[in-house]
Amino acid sequence: MGLDAGMNHDPDAELVARVGRGDRAAAQALMARHLPKMLSLARRMLPGRSEAEDCVQEAFLRLWTHAARWRPGAAKFETWLYRVTLNQCYDRLRRKPTLGLDAAAEIADSEPGPQAALENAALAAEVEAALAELPERQRAAVLLCHYQERGNIEAAEILGVSVEALESLLARGRRTLRTKLAHLKER
Amino acid sequence: MTEENANGPLQADAQSDAEFVGRVLSSLPSVAVPSALEASILAGFDRAAAAGLYRSWLARRSQGMRDAVWPGAPMWKPAVVFALSLIVGLVAGAVVPSSDVLPAAGAVQSQSLAYDTTPALDLAKDL
């Protein structure tokens, strides 16, 4: 499916229009559709859970206040929403230094079985720490393409870069991650 | 094997990196959405919707007033006229009450009015 076709059929357009008219049910539907992925992106981009929650909350507040002025066609709504979320993440990252491993360790809180939970928590903490050390745009590119499974065109649009620039960010990010996490290969 | 040869070792490395990163990131636990966060986001919607309704009510009211004062004019026209009138009024208020208009300090001002006599009014002179 081409980019234009994607823009012409925006699955969120109707919901956004209803949100602009003050429809609470539409707001709930839009939130249910995007909140989990937005939160997981923010959670992997930022060092702390509360930071990620604040970031997503701020992005939704932008959505509520801008929905009435939203005009479909210029860009896909989802692209705009994820760009707002990432910009919120960048703002927070520039305001505060990253916390690294300590904050990364807090993520594994809902894994079943004590032994498996410990192993998974350790693995997740290592991956989180390696991700946290990537430059923010490389991290965003890797997360969008590998964690959120978005296509290169969509990820490039969200990041506001060309597809070639995205591929370059991805290649460097992947290489760095692989170097840092090479010892996980045997697990 | 033949594909790797065709694409070259660099591309094979890139493919291998991508697979590794995909595998590693899939080990991350999913992030649960706290219900408090959902409630907080919806509370934000309620506030924004209420503010939006108030803004649209205010916009309708100002539109009505504007049309009553100056139908079809943009908002800045009556606003400028009102501001100019206010400035003229303030300047006049500051300049006009001079000493010759106001009674002298200490002077007693009195006026008598008799209701049982006809007023001495010369229409030719007083109008």
Image (cartoon, coloured by chain):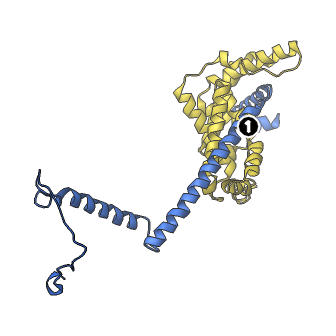
Q: Is residue B93 visible?
A: yes
**Residue located at (69% from left, 46% from top):** A154
Q: Is residue A187 visible?
A: no
**Residue located at (18% from left, 85% from top):** B123
Q: In this view, does B35 lie to the left or right of B96?
A: right
Under tag 1, what secondary structure?
A: helix
The chain identifier of the residue carrying mark 1 reads: B
The percent position of residue B87, horizontal first and vertical second, equals 27, 59
Q: Is residue B16 left or right of residue B78?
A: right
Asked whether A32 or B37 is in front, the reply is: B37
Above/below status of B51 relative to B82: above
Instruction: Name the residue at the right extreme.
Output: A113
Q: Residues within 10 Å of mark 1 (few under 14, many from 20)?
A: some
Chain B visual colour: blue
**Residue located at (61% from left, 42% from top):** A84
Asked whether B6 or A14 is in front, the reply is: A14
Q: Splitting the image into 4 quarters, where does residue B111 fall? A: bottom left
Amino acid, disc 1: Glu
The percent position of residue B102, horizontal first and vertical second, equals 15, 58
Chain with yellow colouring: A
Q: In this view, does B100 lie to the left or right of A165?
A: left
Asked whether A2 or A86 is in front, the reply is: A86
The percent position of residue A7, horizontal first and vertical second, equals 69, 57
Above/below status of B60 relative to A174: below
**Residue located at (23% from left, 58% from top):** B93
Q: Splitting the image into 4 quarters, where does residue A113 fall? A: top right
The percent position of residue A117, horizontal first and vertical second, equals 84, 16
The residue wearing badge 1 is: B38
